[in-house]
């Protein structure tokens, strides 16, 4: 059993699933470094964000402020390099997903002055609401892996998969019954599938259109769809039993 800042992980990653990093829960003091990591390794590389040009000011400033807000009530895991000097090589920012989140994103979008960020928030609201996962699983809250990022110089080492598996273990230990992961990138969708999260809902980017019927975003292939993955966290847990 591994104890990380008051949370116990009762199920370990099998020994053969090695990862060139160590994982721990983030502390409040880590927040500035996490925001900087997200700024450097997610905003400029994630297909949806890049397609909407949210990495440019003032869009970036507003989006980073939203991420800081999410961090306050998040369950965030850090992947740290084994070799000195110690540095962050990956983050998984998870949170409680509630049935009213989509409505709150719309309200935030309506208050946003940045046009591109407003579009992003509207898209996120659709992705939160349309899959109808809370009704599907008959639950008020799910564990959501909201942001997953790996350092640009640490790709293809299994860090994203490692963080996803550890996040699901954390969700179980926190008492969540179901988990979700909204994948706006083909690569994160593959990571979710590998971790056992099934695709429950998908939409092609070219189907997200504005009032003139023109696509709002055009990420480059292979990032052609948004996919929402989800799973029951305990074997044998059925939708019927979760409604009791």
Image (cartoon, rainbow, N blue to C red):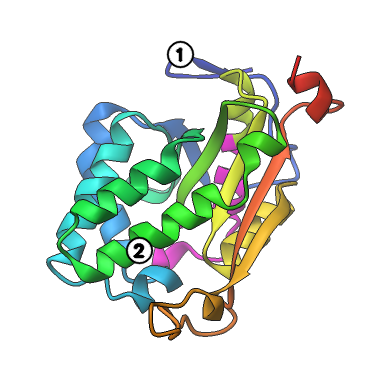
Determine the main secondary structure of the stretch shown in magenta. helix
Viewer-proximal residue, 18 or 122? 122
Q: Position of residue 2 (x, y in %)?
A: 58, 20
Check residue 10 for magenta coloring.
no
Viewer-proximal residue, 143 or 156? 143
Q: Position of residue 134 (x, y in %)?
A: 62, 35
Total labels: the figure holds: 2
Which of the numbered marks, if any, corresponds to residue 6?
1
- Viewer can see residue 150: no
1 and 2 marks in contact (CB < 8 Å): no
Above or below residue 212? Residue 72 is above
Q: Which residues are magenta?
A: 148-167
Secondary structure type for disc 2: helix
Q: Quadrant of residue 211?
A: bottom left
Above or below residue 90? Residue 15 is above
Left of 68 or right of it: where is 104?
A: right
Above or below residue 12? Residue 35 is below
Residue in the picture at 71% in, 33% down: 137
Front: mark 1 or 2: 2
Q: Which quadrant is the N terminus positioned in?
A: top right
| Residue with the mark numbered 2 | 120
Q: Position of residue 148 (x, y in %)?
A: 47, 52
Viewer-proximal residue, 102 or 148? 102
Q: Which quadrant is the C terminus positioned in?
A: top right
């Amino acid at each position: 059993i591994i104890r990380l800042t008051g949370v116990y992980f009762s199920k370990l990653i099998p020994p053969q699933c090695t990862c060139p990093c160590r994982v721990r829960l983030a502390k409040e003091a880590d927040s500035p470094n996490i925001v900087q990591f997200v700024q450097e390794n997610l905003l400029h590389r994630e297909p949806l964000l890049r397609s909407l040009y949210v990495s440019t000011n003032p869009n970036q400033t507003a989006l980073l402020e939203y991420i800081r807000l999410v961090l306050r009530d998040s369950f965030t895991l850090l992947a740290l390099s084994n070799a000195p000097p110690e540095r962050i090589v990956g983050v998984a920012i998870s949170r409680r997903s509630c049935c009213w989140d989509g409505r709150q994103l719309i309200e935030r979008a309506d208050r946003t002055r940045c046009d591109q960020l407003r579009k992003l928030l509207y898209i996120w609201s659709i992705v939160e609401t349309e899959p109808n996962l809370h009704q599907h699983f008959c639950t008020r809250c799910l564990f959501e892996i909201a942001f997953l990022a790996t350092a640009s110089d640490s790709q293809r080492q299994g860090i994203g998969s490692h963080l996803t598996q550890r996040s699901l273990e954390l969700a179980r230990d926190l008492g969540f019954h179901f988990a979700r992961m909204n994948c706006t990138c083909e690569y994160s969708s593959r990571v979710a599938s590998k971790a056992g999260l099934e695709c429950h809902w998908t939409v092609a980017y070219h189907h997200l259109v504005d009032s003139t019927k023109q696509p709002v975003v055009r990420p480059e292939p292979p990032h052609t769809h948004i996919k929402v993955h989800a799973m029951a966290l305990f074997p044998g847990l059925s939708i019927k039993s979760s409604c009791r």
